[in-house]
Image: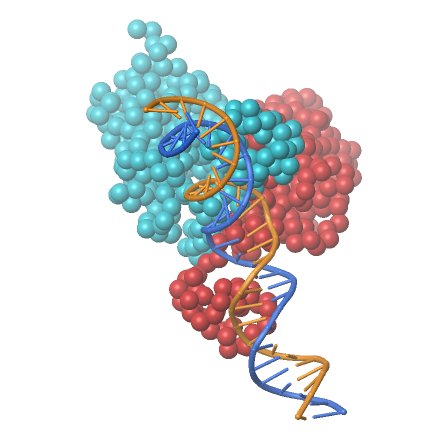
Chain colours: A cyan, B red, C blue, D orange
Amino acid sequence: MAALAGVSISTASKALNGSGRMSAETRERVKRVAQEVGFRPNALARGLITKRSFTIGLLTNDTYGRFTLPVMAGVSEELVGHGVSVFLCAIEDDPERARVHVDAMLDKSVDGIIASGKRLDRQLPVDLSGLAVPVVYAFSKGPADGVTLRSDDEQGARLAVRCLIDAGCRRIVHVTGPKSFLSVGERANAYRAAVDGPPEVLHGVWSEAWGHEAVARLWECDGQKPDGIFCGNDQIARGVVDGLRERGVRVPDDVAVVGFDNWDIVAAQTRPPLTTVDMNLKTLGREAGRLVLAMSEGREVQPGIRKLPCSLVIRQSCRGAEVPA
Amino acid sequence: MAALAGVSISTASKALNGSGRMSAETRERVKRVAQEVGFRPNALARGLITKRSFTIGLLTNDTYGRFTLPVMAGVSEELVGHGVSVFLCAIEDDPERARVHVDAMLDKSVDGIIASGKRLDRQLPVDLSGLAVPVVYAFSKGPADGVTLRSDDEQGARLAVRCLIDAGCRRIVHVTGPKSFLSVGERANAYRAAVDGPPEVLHGVWSEAWGHEAVARLWECDGQKPDGIFCGNDQIARGVVDGLRERGVRVPDDVAVVGFDNWDIVAAQTRPPLTTVDMNLKTLGREAGRLVLAMSEGREVQPGIRKLPCSLVIRQSCRGAEVPA
DNA sequence: TCAACATGGGAAAACATTTTCTCAGATCGA
DNA sequence: TCGATCTGAGAAAATGTTTTCCCATGTTGA
């Protein structure tokens, strides 16, 4: 212990923490010695007395999917700089396992919990309200009086539609996922409001196959063909682009396409690579970390839903403002 | 505290931990009361004295990729049942951040560390040898005297080639990634040993585009065409399948294709869905959790590289034993 | 010169457990 | 009946910090 370098344990503690009273010289000396011997205070002992463990828990039911992965990375990155480590709790929609994880975290006196999921209109299979620790919901549904973070899907959809309009599209249709998803409804509403002509929304499932089929439906009926397609996610967009190519329709020259999610593996490998909406989930994770930290430090945080803006990643399936005027 | 129910604190502790001496009746009573009031010992205080925090750290530099995701889930699932929580440490190949994470974990007295990455021939950008806590390397390169867990890529490749042979293929080529990857060499070696005719290995990058190009090369030279293609990963396989379809070659009837990784989003959406090799990374994660737990409990674990078997997921691009004899 | 006060630093309590000691009473063998 | 052993349970130490007091000594003002 660094106290061997001149002062008592209590003085050393105060020196390192910037509390207590002592000469500037003593404080400096203690700090220097601590630095030299590489002293690191034991977080367990510290946590025992301060009631802060510098630890938070991240609950997620999305262990294979792509949504919470960037969220997790964002949380971890944001917090490590503050000395806070993150417990990863993978629950597979299993209430029992969730309970076990939450209990384990509470035993370890976590300073807060972030609940994260793969759908922002579904709750995790465990009730986190009434816990003694603060909870932040990130890309997951929370209670009405909770602190919730989510992407602004309407704004994202507007971005997509605007990009198509800027590219000169006059007849834009929306091919998207099941109506049961909240975000599907929101994106569709924003699409309807943003588009000039009469809106046309095709609902299906979140797959490439549905993208194919949607193209088939659009092209195999008579009537005017669209010159722009806004897709509910990148998988559908890929199916759409593939379907168009197979029909000899050129993307983006004949029809421009915009996706949603910026799922790199899909968006970048599509021919041509997809212009798509990015929900900035890593930023969302960082924000969740920031908020839960603030709450754990007793700072007041307004409950409610915070919508974080999406951004548009322009690749080649829609070139946006390169419109000829 | 449950000690209010008849006995002293020390007796209560001994009752709940099964240590010390007391009448069976007392022990039962304490346990029952603890259960009733929902008593949960404080892990910080316990860790302070027992030197076990029931906490391990998971270091990964693969925050977007698909490899450590299932590994992480496996670790978390395996350990939570033992009361152990897992610290998620996302380091982006950044030695500085890695250092910070490791320090934070050591401060919190983790019982062990699992180092996980996206390539099993690359070390994480931080030296974990000489730490006071046990380290397990999972899908990441470790030191020679370390405990390392990895997939058995040679066995996986044999599975793939055998499936093609069983499907009746006589001329099988291998389209794979860059030579610089250890696993590429291993899979190629196993392929060469398992195949009947003269081997042919095409190296490229890990992309669909390369799969396309490989098909172009194979079909645009004269000479015998392959009737089976073993691909280095699912993305290449998808490119190959798409390339074949565009040439009017039927899969699997004219040419059977097997991929590697079982990356669901790619393998299942390919037309036809890919038969592919699964590295069972979740199982690998569980095993890593098991090992690090054992080591943290002082049990002896043999250093060395443990290869875990791959399995074959049969979909439609190669139907295996449905060979007509 | 003396009380009042500021300054620097240490002693000890507190945190919630586990673990080692100790000790009174019961049991047992001779 | 007496020492020895066994049994059940509590007291106290220990874990590594932070924090609250407290006490010297020095300084200031009257």
Q: Nearer the viewer, residue B157 or A216?
A: B157
Q: Position of residue C22 (x, y in %)?
A: 62, 68
Q: Position of residue A274 (x, y in %)?
A: 44, 23
Which quadrant of the structure image shows residue A39? top right
Q: Please state if A10 lies on the left or on the right of A283 as rendered.
A: right
Which quadrant of the structure image shows residue A307? top left
Q: Please state if A256 lies on the left or on the right of B152 as rendered.
A: left
Q: Nearer the viewer, residue B240 or A13?
A: A13
Above/below status of B145 relative to C1: below
Above/below status of A235 relative to B75: above
Task: Residue at 71%, 27% (x, y): give it.
Answer: B179
Q: From this viewpoint, is residue A175 visible? A: no
Total residue callouts:
0
Task: Residue at 36%, 50% (x, y): give it.
Answer: A131
Above/below status of C2 relative to B306: above
Which quadrant of the structure image shows residue B86? top right
Q: Nearer the viewer, residue A43 or B76?
A: A43
Q: Please state if A10 lies on the left or on the right of A217 as rendered.
A: right
Task: Residue at 47%, 46% (x, y): give it.
Answer: A49
Q: Position of residue A167 (x, y in %)?
A: 34, 14
Q: Please state if A217 lies on the left or on the right of B89 as rendered.
A: left
**Viewport quadrant of the N terminus of chain A:** top right
Q: Position of residue A133 (x, y in %)?
A: 38, 46
Task: Residue at 74%, 37% (x, y): give it.
Answer: B143
Q: Residue furthest top?
A: A325
Q: From this viewpoint, is residue A166 visible? A: yes
**Viewport quadrant of the C terminus of chain A:** top left
Q: Nearer the viewer, residue B216 or A315?
A: A315
